[in-house]
Amino acid sequence: MDAGSLNPFSKLRGRSRCPLQEQILQRINSKENLDRFIPNRSAMDYDYAHYMLTEGRKIKENQPVFSPARDAYRMQLAEALNMNRTRILAFKNKPPTPVELFPSDHTTSSVHPAKPSKPQRHIPQSSERTLDAPDLMDDFYLNLLDWGSSNVLAIALGNTVYLWDASDSSTSELVTIDDDNGPVTSVSWAPDGQHIAIGLNNSEVQLWDSASNRQLRTLRGCHRSRVGSMAWNSHILTTGGMDGMIVNNDVRIRSHVVKTYRGHRQEVCGLKWSASGQQLASGGNDNLVHIWDMSKASSNSPTQWIHRLEDHTSAVKALAWCPFQSNLLASGGGGGDRTIKFWNTHTGACLNSVDTGSQVCALLWNKNESELLSSHGFTQNQLILWKYPSMVKMAEIMGHTSRVLHMAQSPDGCTVASAAGDETLRFWNVFGAPEVAKPAPKVHQEPFSHLNRIR
């Protein structure tokens, strides 16, 4: 006899329920029992329930006469229907074994441990080092600080250019300009970290070899007044003057002026080449930002800008190309503007504008994280570290007591030097340490190999 033949109630499925079943179900679903457990019908055995409510009850109430055959049949029937159960209604399935979300120290979890989150970087609120910078000119339009690839910092104090070697903290004097030609109005290291350009108040530019402390040549005829901004693009030194002119100078040849850009009506106080060397950004006292294309600079005729950006309402000195997005430029406006703006230099579109509340003097991108550092003038003279692109303030660093006119970044991208009108030079470990030390780039000396023969 199979199990199916032992179940005389299997054919009752699909039949109408008896009055007692209907009464139970009505009581279960009635409003007066909403606060009670609701049975799980999918887990209920209706054959067993029907038997217990009908035949089972009759057996218990009638107490039939003892019969061995009947008892054997009931035992087989009870075994087939698993009648050793005591409950008719099933409320829920057995709950799963709970998982300990926070295991104790003595418990070993079989689940793979979660990857530890990156620890939050500590941003110091005080400078790592402070040096005196007497006679630093308190002039917003000049660029008097630069950090070269050889880890040497150059700063112009009045008529003198000093070099500070970060490897041993030694200081040396490079040159002192006479009063007729000075003061020094800008400094800029060449990509090799050995040669340096010095812009002067008399419109001239001097090229020096820092290793031998020797002047190599003087560039004349570029401008009619002081040279307040400079930027290198390989062997091309681009200079911006108070006359509104921008000039490309090829330092390898005698007739060094190879390209002229005309677009600014007032002093050019900001110049930055993109990392690719294909685009030049310029900012001026006329509140304008221009984007120029290197590929259109093949002749000596004045080059037309590819974008003329007119959204700023004050002088634009602070310019910074994003290191991880080639067509992204950040620009900062002076005291009448106080905003940092972000530009797509392929389209000329302004992507975002943030009101900083104070004069923007300089901008630097973090080379290792999506962060931007700005230095400010009136009224709080602070440094602000921003998270990009949300532009949430990560830190606001005080220390200078006058506007922070200049910033320069160490070759490894971690340390920032700031120079202010309070005549101090401060070093900040604001960008932290890079995750992986990057090897120093190979220096290509060829562009400057002919300087010794040109006077």
Image (cartoon, helix red, strand yellow):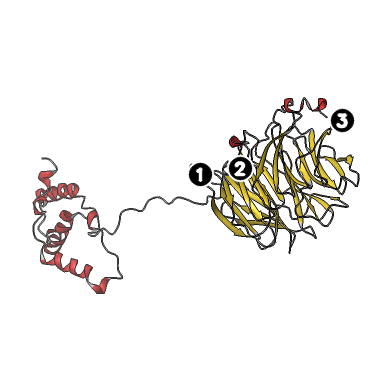
Of the 4 image quadrants, the one containing the N terminus is top left
Could you tell me which secondary element the residue under label 3 belongs to?
loop
| Residue type, mark 3 in image | Ser
The dot on residue 204 is: none
Q: Is residue 44 left or right of residue 199?
A: left
Q: Can residue 11 be spotted in the picture? A: yes
Q: Residue 245's spot in the image, x, y percent?
A: 70, 45
Q: Which residue bears the numbered disc 2?
A: 292
Is the Cβ of the residue at disc 1 closer than 8 Å to that at disc 2? Answer: no
Neighbour tally class for label 3: few under 14, some 14-19, many 20 plus, Cα within 10 Å:
few
**Residue 5 occupies which quadrant of the picture?**
top left
| Residue density around tag 2, few if under 14, some if 14–19, many if 20 or more, within 10 Å | many
Tell me the residue that label 3 is attached to.
Answer: 212
The numbered disc on residue 109 is 1
Label 1 vs label 2, nearer the camera: 2
- Residue drawn at point x = 24 percent, y = 54 percent: 43
Q: Nearer the viewer, residue 15 or 240?
A: 240
Q: Amino acid at mark 1?
A: Ser
Measure how far apart labels 1 and 2 are at the Cα level.
61 Å
Q: Is residue 249 left or right of residue 52?
A: right
Compare marks 3 and 2 and give the one earlier in the sequence. Answer: 3
Q: Quadrant of residue 12?
A: bottom left
Give the mark nearest the N terminus, 1 or 2: 1
Q: Is residue 430 visible?
A: no
